[in-house]
Image (cartoon, coloured by chain):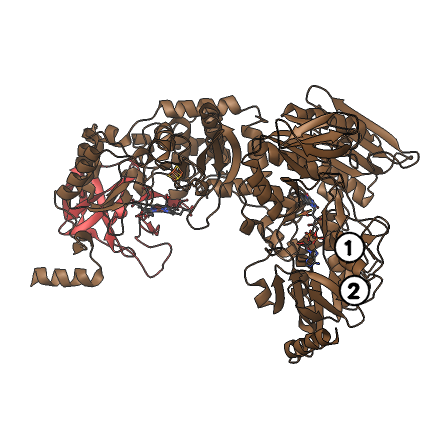
C-alpha cells in the first residue's frame, strides 16, 4: 500500500545536496542529484553523533554507489540502501521519493 | 699528597664498590663526546662499563655546526644534542660545569676543578678545540670574543647592543659565518684576513676573488693580506687595529675566528705524545701513546692532521666503540674535508684538491660573469677521475661531484659537461642508480647507499622512516637531496607505484588539479570531473576542488555550482557543534573591537541565548545558534558593521596582535595597526588549510607570532618575518624568513609565500608540513620568494591581487539573497525546530545537554 506525502516544491531542493523534511515526526533527508535527475531519501538522524544532520553532509559516490558523508564524524551511508560503509551493523531507513509535476513527494510506507 | 690520594680512593671505593664494572671516563661533552656516549648507549659497552663524563660548559652538548642559528632565533634548548633524561636512562654520571684538570696515568685517575676524582679503566679525551687567538698586544681587550660556544655568542649579543662596527679576524669558513652574524646584528661589518684570499684552504684564487666580490656586494668589507700587529684604543670606536702595512681599522667589537687550536693541554700535562702542530697523537684505532687513553674529535691529531669538522670526529668515535668491543675492523682512515655551505647567501663548495697540487692534474674552469658563477674541476692526468672542485655562486653540482670524487667513479669523456650549464635541456649528472653500493651518502653518520637500500627493503619507504632508521640526513642535512633521490630511484626500481591520487574520482594530486584548473581556466567542479575525472566525486575531491576554485577565482562559495563542494561548515558559513547547532564568529581584525561592537555582540548573544566565549584567536565566539537563526543573527551583526570571521573556512582565520607602540611602553612599531591591515588584506583567502597570522610590537612577542603560519615582529630596522609555524597537534616554531623589512616588501613576500603555498601544497596541509616536505625547505622557499628563482614572483602577486579584488563578505551576500536563505531552514516543509537540540544551564550560560540530562528532560516532558 502506498501513501505519498507532499513535501515541498521542486525548487526547494538543493542541487547535489540535501534538505531535511519532517514527516509524521520523522526527520528525513532528501538528496537531489541534479544532472542525473535522481532523488534519494534516508533518515536524517546520524546514529554515531546522535544528532539530526545528515541532510547537511556532502554527497558523491564510493565505487559508484551514491553516498552521503556525515558532517559530524564523516561516516558514509549508501543512499540507496541506508547501509553504513564503515560499520556493517548500522543501516538507516530509506524511503521512496519522487517528483510529481512541480512537487516532491515521499512515501513513508515504502520504508525499507 | 698521600692524604689527598687516600681521600680520593675512599670516595672511589664508596662510589663504585657496588659495581664490579670497569669505569669509562669521557672528558668533554661536546659534539663528538656526546655522539660517543650515544653510540655507547646503543652498544654492549653500556653494560660493561660504568660511564662518567665531564662537561666543562654550563650546557650539555649542543649543535656547534648550527651555532650561528642562535642569532636567528634558535634557542639553546633547540640546539641541544642531549635528549631529556639521556644520562639518567642510560645510567651515566655527568658532571656539568666541571672540567678535568689533571690526569694521573700511573694511578689511572682524573681530577676535576670541583675536586672530584674518578678512577678510570679506559679514558676517552674529547676536549675539542678552542678558537685561535693571535698572540698580539691588546688581544684580550674588552669585547674581543672568540666564536666557539653559546657563551661566546651571548657575549657578542651583549656587546653588539652598543657597538656600531664589528670586525672578524679570519676569512675562513667560520670567519665568514661570524661576519654574517655581525651583519645580521646590524653592525657595519669587516673581515680581516691574513692570507691574500678568502677561504684560502678551500678555494683557488678566482673562486676566492668572486666570493670576495659577492660578500662585499652585500655590505661586508673584506681586507685581505692584513697582518694585525696590535690592538689599541680607537678614536671613533672602542678599538683600533693596527696592521703591519701601516694601515688601521677602527672597530667596537672583535670576533676571533682565525682557525682552531686543539685542546691538548690535559694530554700535555700527563705526558701523552703531542703532534708538532698541536693535537693528541692517535693511531688508526684512535689510541694515544697510552693504550688506555683514546682521543677523538678536534683534540686528536691523526697523521699530523687535525680535522675541524664533525664527520671525522664521529668516525673516530665509531672506531673507538669498535676497538673497545674487541674489533679492529673499523680503523680510522682519514676523512674527506669537502665542504659546501652558504655564506652570507652565497653558495660555496670545495672538494678534494681544489688547488690542483696533484702532479699532472688537468683543470677545467667555467665562469659566468653576469650571474657571478665560478666552477672549477681538477681532474687526474688521464682525464678519468675527479681530484677536486671549487664552486662559487651555484653549488648545485656539489652532490654529484662529491660522489664522483668519493667513490672514484669514472668521469664522462668530457668532464666539463658536468659544470657547463645544460642549455640543451638534457640532464647531466650522476643518477643515484650509477652509485656503487659502497658510496657514502651521509658522511655525518657514515651511511652508505647499501645501508639505505637495506633499510628500504626492510620497509622504510618514506623519507621520514628512512631517516629515523639510518640517521642519514639528521646531521648537517647536506645529504638530504641525495638521500631522497636514492629513495625515489629505489622505490621506482622496486616497482612501487606511489599512489598520490587525491581519491578514486581523480587520478591526480591536489597540485595537479590546481594546475589543470589554472591552465584550462576551469570554473566548476562538474566541468573538471567530466574532463578529468570519473563518477560523482566525494567529500574529499569536492572540498579540495571547492578550495582550489575559491583560491583561484574567489567566487561566492555558495554560488549554485559550488554549493555542493563546501564542507558542512562552509556550506552554512558556520561551524557545526556536537549537537548540530552552530557557532557565530564575527571578524574582529587584529583582535580589535569597539565598545559599540561589543555591545551589539552582547545584545545578539542575549537575544538568542547563545553561549559566549573569548576564543584563543582573540575574538568572541557565540555558540548554540540553530540553523534557522543564523541569517537573522548575521543580519544584526552586519548592520552593526561586522563581517564573517571565516571561522568555518580553510582560509585566513585571525591575525593576532599585541597593542604595540600605540600603547605599550616597549612597542617598537604599530603591531596592532599592521595586524588589522593584514587581516583585512587576506580575509576570505581560501587555502589548502587554515592560515593564522600574528604581529608583535617587539621581541617580547606577546602576540606569539613565532607560532603562526605567518609571524611578524617589529624590530628597530623594520619587520622580521617568520613563516610556517603552528600550534595545534604538532607545534612548530616558525622559521625566520627575512629581517628588517619595510612594509611594502613584507606584504610582497607574504603575497608570494601564500600564493605559492596555495598552488603547491597538498590538501589539508598546513604551511609547516608543506615546508617540511618541500625539497630544499626554507632555503628553497627563500629562493622562490626573495630571489624569484622560478621567475613567477610577479605572477604570484598578481594572483593575490585578483583574490583580494574579489573579496566579499559571504554572509552579507547570503542574507541579501532570498533564495540562499531558504537553505537555512531546519525542515523544508515545516517551521518546527529540531527537538533533539536541548540546552541546560552552566555557569550562567547554556550548553548542550548530555545524554542523561536529555533522557531526564524528555521524561519530565512526557510525564
Ligand atoms: C573556538 C576555538 C577555541 C576557543 O574556545 O578558543 C577553536 C575551536 C575549534 N578549533 Fe581550534 N579553536 C580556536 C583556536 C585555536 C588555536 C589558537 C590560535 O589560533 O591562536 C589553535 C592552535 C594554533 C594553530 O592552529 O596553529 C587551534 C588549533 C586547532 C586545530 C589543530 C590544527 C593543527 O594544525 O594541528 C584544529 C583541527 C584542524 O583544523 O584540523 C582546530 C579545530 C577547531 C574546530 C574548528 C574543531 C571543529 O571542527 O569543530 C573548533 C570549532 C570552532 C568553532 O566552532 O567556532 N583547532 N585552534 C578557537 C577559535 C579561534 C578563532 O577565533 O577563530
Ligand atoms: C661556528 C661554528 C660552525 C661550524 N660549522 C661546521 C660545519 O658546518 N660543518 C662541520 O663539520 N663542522 C663545523 N664546525 C666544527 C664542529 O663544530 C666541530 O668539528 C665539532 O664541534 C667537534 O666536536 P668535539 O666534540 O671534538 O669538540 P667540541 O664540540 O668543541 O667539544 C669539546 C668539549 O669539551 C669541553 N672540554 C674541553 N676540555 C675539557 C676538560 N678538560 N674537561 C671537561 N670538558 C672539557 C669543551 O668545553 C667542549 O664543550 C663548526 C664550528 C663552529 C664553532
Ligand atoms: S610584544 Fe612588545 S610591544 Fe607588544 S605588548 Fe608585548 S611588550 Fe608590548
Ligand atoms: S651528511 Fe650530514 S646529515 Fe648526512
Q: Residue B522, position in %: x, y?
A: 42, 27
The residue wearing badge 2 is B293
Q: Quadrant of the N terminus of chain B?
A: bottom right
Colour for chain B in the figure: brown
In the image: residue B538, left or right of residue B577: right
Q: Does residue B569 lie above or below A73 as drawn? A: above
The quarter of the rendered structure image containing the C terminus of chain B is bottom left
Q: Which of pointers 1 and 2 lies earlier in the amino acid sequence?
A: 1
What chain letter is assigned to the residue under label 1? Answer: B
Please say if B532 is above or below B36: above
Q: Colour of chain A?
A: red
Q: How many marks?
A: 2
Considering only vertical position in the picture, is A96 above or below B633?
below
From this viewpoint, is residue B521 visible?
no
Q: Nearer the viewer, residue B401 or B146?
A: B146
Q: Are marks 1 and 2 in contact (CB under 8 Å)?
A: no
Splitting the image into 4 quarters, where does residue B629 fall? top left
Amino acid at each position: 500500500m502506498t501513501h505519498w506525502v507532499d513535501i515541498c516544491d521542486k525548487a526547494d531542493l538543493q542541487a547535489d545536496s540535501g534538505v531535511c523534511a519532517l514527516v509524521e515526526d520523522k526527520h528525513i533527508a532528501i538528496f537531489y542529484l541534479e544532472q542525473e535527475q535522481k532523488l534519494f531519501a534516508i533518515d536524517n538522524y546520524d546514529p554515531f553523533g546522535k544528532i539530526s544532520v545528515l541532510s547537511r553532509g556532502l554527497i558523491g559516490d564510493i565505487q559508484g554507489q551514491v553516498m552521503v558523508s556525515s558532517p559530524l564524524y564523516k561516516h558514509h551511508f549508501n543512499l540507496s540502501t541506508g547501509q553504513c560503509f564503515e560499520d556493517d551493523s548500522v543501516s538507516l531507513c530509506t524511503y521512496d521519493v519522487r517528483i510529481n509535476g512541480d512537487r516532491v513527494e515521499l512515501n513513508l510506507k515504502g520504508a525499507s | 699528597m698521600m692524604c689527598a690520594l687516600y681521600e680520593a680512593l675512599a670516595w672511589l671505593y664508596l662510589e663504585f664498590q657496588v659495581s664490579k664494572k670497569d669505569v669509562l671516563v669521557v672528558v668533554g661533552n661536546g659534539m663528538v663526546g656526546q655522539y660517543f656516549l650515544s653510540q655507547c648507549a646503543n652498544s654492549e659497552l653500556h653494560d660493561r662499563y660504568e660511564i662518567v663524563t665531564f662537561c666543562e660548559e654550563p650546557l650539555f652538548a649542543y649543535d656547534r655546526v648550527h651555532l650561528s642559528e642562535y642569532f636567528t632565533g634558535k634557542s639553546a634548548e633547540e640546539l641541544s644534542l642531549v635528549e631529556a633524561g639521556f644520562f639518567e636512562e642510560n645510567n651515566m654520571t655527568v658532571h656539568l660545569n666541571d672540567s678535568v684538570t689533571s690526569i694521573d696515568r700511573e694511578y689511572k685517575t682524573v681530577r676535576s676543578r670541583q675536586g672530584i676524582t674518578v678512577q678510570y679503566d679506559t679514558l676517552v679525551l674529547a676536549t675539542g678545540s678552542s678558537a685561535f687567538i693571535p698572540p698580539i698586544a691588546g688581544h684580550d681587550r674588552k669585547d674581543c670574543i672568540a666564536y666557539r660556544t653559546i657563551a661566546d655568542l651571548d657575549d657578542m649579543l651583549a656587546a653588539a647592543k652598543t657597538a656600531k662596527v664589528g670586525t672578524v679576524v679570519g676569512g675562513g669558513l667560520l670567519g665568514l659565518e661570524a661576519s654574517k652574524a655581525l651583519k645580521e646584528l646590524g653592525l657595519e661589518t669587516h673581515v680581516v684576513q691574513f692570507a691574500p684570499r678568502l677561504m684560502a684552504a678551500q678555494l683557488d684564487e678566482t673562486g676566492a676573488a668572486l666570493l670576495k666580490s659577492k660578500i662585499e656586494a652585500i655590505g661586508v668589507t673584506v681586507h685581505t693580506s692584513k697582518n694585525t700587529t696590535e690592538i689599541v684604543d680607537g678614536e671613533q670606536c672602542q678599538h683600533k687595529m693596527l696592521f703591519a702595512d701601516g694601515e688601521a681599522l677602527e672597530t667596537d667589537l672583535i670576533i676571533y675566528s682565525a682557525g682552531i687550536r686543539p685542546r691538548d693541554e690535559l694530554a700535555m700535562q700527563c705526558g701523552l705524545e703531542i703532534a708538532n702542530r698541536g693535537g693528541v697523537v692517535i693511531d688508526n684505532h684512535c689510541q694515544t701513546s697510552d693504550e688506555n687513553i683514546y682521543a677523538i674529535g678536534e683534540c686528536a691529531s691523526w697523521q699530523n692532521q687535525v680535522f675541524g669538522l664533525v664527520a671525522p670526529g664521529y668516525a673516530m668515535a665509531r672506531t673507538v666503540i669498535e676497538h673497545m668491543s674487541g674489533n679492529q675492523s673499523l680503523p680510522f682512515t682519514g676523512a674527506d674535508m669537502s665542504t659546501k655551505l652558504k655564506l652570507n647567501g652565497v653558495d660555496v663548495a670545495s672538494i678534494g684538491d681544489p688547488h690542483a697540487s696533484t702532479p699532472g692534474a688537468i683543470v677545467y674552469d667555467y665562469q659566468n660573469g653576469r650571474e657571478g658563477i665560478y666552477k672549477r674541476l681538477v681532474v687526474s692526468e688521464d682525464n678519468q677521475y675527479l681530484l677536486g672542485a671549487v664552486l662559487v655562486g651555484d653549488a648545485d653540482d656539489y652532490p654529484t661531484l662529491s660522489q664522483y670524487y668519493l667513490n672514484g667513479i669514472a668521469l664522462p669523456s668530457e668532464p666539463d659537461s658536468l659544470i657547463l650549464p645544460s642549455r640543451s635541456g638534457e640532464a647531466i649528472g650522476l643518477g643515484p642508480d650509477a652509485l656503487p653500493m659502497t658510496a657514502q651518502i651521509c658522511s655525518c653518520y657514515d651511511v652508505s647507499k647499501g645501508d639505505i637500500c637495506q633499510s628500504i627493503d626492510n620497509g622504510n619507504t618514506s623519507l621520514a622512516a628512512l631517516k629515523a632508521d639510518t640517521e642519514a640526513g639528521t646531521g648537517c642535512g647536506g645529504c638530504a637531496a641525495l638521500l631522497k633521490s636514492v629513495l625515489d630511484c629505489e622505490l621506482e626500481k622496486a616497482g612501487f607505484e606511489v599512489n598520490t591520487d587525491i581519491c578514486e574520482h581523480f587520478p591526480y594530486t591536489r597540485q595537479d588539479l590546481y594546475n589543470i584548473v589554472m591552465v584550462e581556466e576551469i570554473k566548476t567542479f562538474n566541468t573538471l570531473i567530466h574532463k578529468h575525472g570519473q563518477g560523482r566525486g566525494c567529500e574529499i575531491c569536492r572540498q579540495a576542488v571547492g578550495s582550489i576554485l575559491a583560491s583561484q577565482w574567489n567566487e561566492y562559495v555558495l554560488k549554485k555550482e559550488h554549493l555542493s563542494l563546501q564542507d558542512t561548515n562552509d556550506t552554512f558559513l558556520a561551524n557545526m557543534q556536537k549537537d548540530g547547532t552552530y557557532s557565530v564568529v564575527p571578524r574582529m581584525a587584529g583582535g580589535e573591537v569597539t565598545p559599540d561592537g561589543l555591545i551589539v555582540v552582547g545584545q545578539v548573544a542575549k537575544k538568542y541565548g547563545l553561549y559566549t566565549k573569548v576564543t584563543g584567536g582573540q575574538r568572541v565566539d557565540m555558540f548554540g545558534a540553530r540553523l534557522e537563526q543564523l541569517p537573522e543573527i548575521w543580519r544584526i551583526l552586519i548592520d552593526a558593521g561586522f563581517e564573517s570571521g571565516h571561522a568555518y573556512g580553510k582560509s585566513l582565520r585571525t591575525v593576532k596582535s599585541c597593542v604595540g607602540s600605540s600603547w605599550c611602553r616597549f612597542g617598537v612599531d604599530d603591531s596592532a595597526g599592521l595586524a588589522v591591515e593584514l587581516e583585512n588584506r587576506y580575509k576570505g583567502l581560501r587555502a589548502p588549510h587554515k592560515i593564522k597570522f600574528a604581529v608583535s610590537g617587539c621581541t617580547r612577542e606577546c602576540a606569539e607570532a613565532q607560532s603562526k603560519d605567518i609571524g611578524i615582529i617589529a624590530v628597530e630596522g623594520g619587520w622580521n618575518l617568520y613563516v610556517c609555524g603552528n600550534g595545534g597537534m604538532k607545534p612548530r616554531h616558525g622559521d625566520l624568513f627575512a629581517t628588517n623589512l619595510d612594509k611594502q616588501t613584507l606584504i610582497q613576500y607574504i603575497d608570494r609565500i601564500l600564493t605559492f603555498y596555495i598552488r603547491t601544497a597538498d590538501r589539508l596541509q598546513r604551511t609547516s608540513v608543506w615546508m617540511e616536505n618541500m625539497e630544499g625547505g626554507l632555503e628553497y622557499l627563500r629562493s622562490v620568494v626573495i630571489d624569484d628563482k622560478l621567475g613567477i614572483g610577479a605572477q604570484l602577486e598578481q594572483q593575490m591581487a585578483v583574490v583580494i579584488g574579489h573579496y566579499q563578505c559571504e554572509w552579507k551576500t547570503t542574507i541579501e539573497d532570498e533564495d540562499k536563505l531558504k537553505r537555512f531552514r531546519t525542515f523544508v516543509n515545516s517551521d518546527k525546530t529540531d527537538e533533539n537540540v536541548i540546552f541546560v544551564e552552566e555557569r550562567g550560560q547554556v550548553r548542550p545537554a548530555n545524554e542523561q540530562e536529555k533522557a531526564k528532560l524528555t521524561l519530565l516532558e512526557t510525564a
